[in-house]
Amino acid sequence: MRTLLLLALLLTPAVGDAHRFGAGTRPLLLRIEGHVGAPREGDRKIADLTMRRGDAIITFQVDEIWVLSGDAVGLDVLHEVEPYNPNMQVTGPRPVVDRLAQADPAQPLAVIGFFRGGQRILELSSVEPLLPKKR
């Protein structure tokens, strides 16, 4: 009985962390702001994400990341995907994913989608242009 209790106590944090980062049935709703392409002067340089779309890789410079729904913060997501290359796979409706893949590197974007941790999948729901921030 003690062994069973000890095993349950040891596994509880691991299961909690998996759900926290969207690995379970509850993905995180993210908003990521930045631009496609290489880093440029004035970027906040929070992260440099690589996203796989089929055989293509989309590079995205992250200036801001927020968790809109879910029990985590944006940096948790970035830390989870950091060791992998590409960092995540991007899916969603073809026109939405095309907007990201074909975006002008000079155009700041707001990317919104559901992130499933563990699988490292970002299912896009919106890719919209942002007004450039005054520097």
Image (cartoon, rainbow, N blue to C red):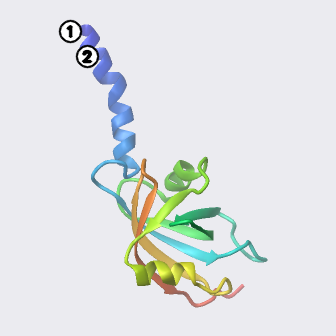
For label 2, the SS is helix
The residue drawn where x is 68% and y is 88% is 134
Residue located farthest toward the front when viewing the structure as drawn: 55
Q: Which residue does the image show at 59% across and 57% down from the upper left?
A: 86
Q: Judge left or right: residue 102 versus residue 5.
A: right
Q: Which mark is residue 1?
A: 1
Q: Residues within 10 Å of mark 1 (few under 14, many from 20)?
A: few
Q: Outermost residue, top direction?
A: 2
Name the element at disc 1. Answer: loop
Three-letter amino acid code of the residue under disc 1: Met
The reply to whether callout 1 and callout 2 are in contact (CB within 8 Å) is yes
Figure quadrant of residue 52: bottom right
Amino acid at pointer 2: Leu
Q: Quadrant of the C terminus?
A: bottom right
Image quadrant assignment for residue 91 = bottom left
Q: Residue at x 48, y 85 (%)?
A: 128
Task: Judge whether 61 appears above or below 103 on screen.
Answer: above
The residue lying furthest to the right in this view is 41
Judged left or right of residue 4, residue 109 is: right
Q: x%, y% of residue 126?
A: 41, 80
- State left or right for residue 112 relative to residue 100: left
Who is closer to the viewer here, 30 or 71? 30
Q: Which mark is residue 5?
A: 2
* Furthest residue toward bottom: 131
The quadrant the N terminus occupies is top left
Q: Nearer the viewer, residue 45 or 126?
A: 126
